[in-house]
């Protein structure tokens, strides 16, 4: 039997649910409080630089799943961009993530065996590291920690690494080869034409209402639809009744510069705590199109989150996890609402993980 679904949010979770449920014969309405579709994956075309600006920070699609890769390729063709990040620290540029060339730049080592011995000399004897700082000192030593991790993490999280869990840094690979690909996944690239075109195709023939805040007419929405898929912050749905979940936010300074190639790479991390921004992006490198004499560049600044700002990174502390579990228990009282995506599940997801989560969920809804 056909059902009426309201989908709150037009990012990858909402758009995937909308596409699959519509194709299964259900009626869907997508609403979004922003002026555009695509959530934080939104891109806009900058004519003067002939490239697509990643408006809310760099998004590189990567996955090991052939199923997810085939699914996303229904809505876009991808270029062959590979994410090879560079780090700027004290007027030097380093290869990143940490690999054999990084270790050569720092210590002069040239082979995996030399690198192993070099790291072993620098590791500090810390059993059972309890936080990010201790994990780094125990695994890579103080020089690597201070060059790449300490200042950057302090800026990004507004907490010293000794106050952060080691799990955050474990996402960053350390390689004893010259492989500087940030990701290990089989499939990787940037959609030709930008991410917004993906959402336009995913939401084709599905009604979308922008500038529409679910909370302003919440009871009406809940009464008019058989089921609501909510991809906003889970604590906002429950009116922050037991407190605000904590996030870190970002702000972006987008610039058009008179240079055909401003920094020579798509992403440069700036790891000194005294430098106020964490990353600079040059967007033409994502598109792999260098025809324009101008370039679109973005400076990314970490920002304290407060209501009205963009929620970017869930802050993974015991207190926040405990608070999230309280909200999760409240969801049992609203059986006709599904909570999904980064904000709905208070979890750091990559794009392919969001799509996989949505595809799995709609099996039980369709």
Image (tube, rainbow, N blue to C red):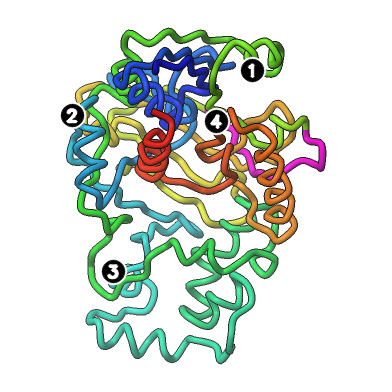
Q: Earlier in the sequence, mark 2 or mark 1?
A: 2
Residue bearing the label numbered 1: 222
Q: Residue 204: x percent and y percent?
A: 31, 12
Viewer-side residue, 213 vs 153: 213
Q: Which residues make up the magenta segment? A: 240-253
User: Which numbered circle lies on residue 77?
Assistant: 2
Q: Which SS class for mark 1?
A: helix
The answer to whether marks 3 and 4 mark residues whose Cβ atoms lie closer than 8 Å is: no
- Residue 241 lies in the magenta-colored region: yes
Residue bearing the label numbered 3: 101
Q: Residue 296: x percent and y percent?
A: 38, 26
What residue lies at 40% left-to-right and 84% top-to-bottom?
Answer: 119
User: Which numbered circle lies on residue 103?
Assistant: none
Q: Earlier in the sequence, mark 2 or mark 4?
A: 2
- Select label 4 or label 1 by which is in front: 1
Residue bearing the label numbered 4: 231
CA separation, marks 3 and 4?
41 Å
The answer to whether marks 2 and 1 mark residues whose Cβ atoms lie closer than 8 Å is: no
Quadrant of res 233: top right
């Amino acid at each position: 039997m056909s059902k009426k679904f309201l989908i709150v949010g037009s990012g990858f979770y909402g758009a995937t649910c909308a596409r699959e449920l519509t194709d299964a014969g259900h009626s869907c309405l997508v609403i979004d409080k922003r002026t555009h579709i695509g959530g934080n994956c939104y891109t806009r075309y900058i004519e003067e630089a002939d490239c697509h600006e990643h408006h809310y920070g760099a998004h590189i699609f990567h996955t090991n799943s052939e199923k997810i890769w085939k699914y996303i390729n229904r809505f876009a063709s991808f270029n062959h961009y590979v994410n090879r990040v560079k780090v700027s620290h004290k007027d030097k540029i380093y290869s990143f993530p940490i690999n054999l060339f990084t270790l050569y730049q720092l210590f002069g080592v040239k082979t995996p065996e030399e690198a192993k011995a070099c790291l072993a000399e620098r590791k500090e004897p810390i059993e059972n590291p309890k936080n990010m700082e201790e994990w780094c000192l125990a695994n890579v030593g103080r020089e690597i920690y201070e060059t790449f991790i300490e200042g950057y993490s302090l800026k990004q999280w507004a907490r010293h690494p000794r106050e952060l869990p080691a799990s955050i840094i474990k996402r960053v690979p350390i390689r004893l080869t010259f492989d500087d690909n940030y990701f290990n996944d089989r499939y990787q690239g940037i959609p030709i034409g930008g991410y917004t075109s993906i959402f336009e195709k995913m939401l084709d023939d599905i009604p979308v209402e922008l500038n529409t805040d679910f909370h302003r007419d919440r009871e009406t929405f809940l009464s008019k639809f058989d089921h609501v898929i909510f991809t906003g912050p889970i604590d906002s749905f429950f009116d922050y009744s037991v407190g605000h979940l904590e996030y870190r936010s970002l702000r972006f300074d987008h610039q058009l510069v008179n240079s055909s190639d401003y920094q020579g790479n798509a992403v440069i991390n700036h790891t000194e705590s005294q430098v106020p921004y964490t990353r600079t992006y040059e967007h033409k490198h994502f598109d792999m199109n260098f025809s324009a004499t101008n370039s679109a560049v973005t400076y990314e600044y970490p920002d304290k989150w407060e209501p009205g700002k963009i929620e970017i990174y869930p802050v993974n502390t015991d207190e926040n996890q405990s608070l999230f579990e309280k909200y999760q228990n409240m969801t049992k009282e609203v059986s006709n609402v599904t909570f999904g995506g980064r904000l709905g599940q208070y979890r750091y997801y990559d794009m392919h993980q969001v799509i996989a989560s949505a595809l799995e969920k709609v099996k039980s809804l369709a």
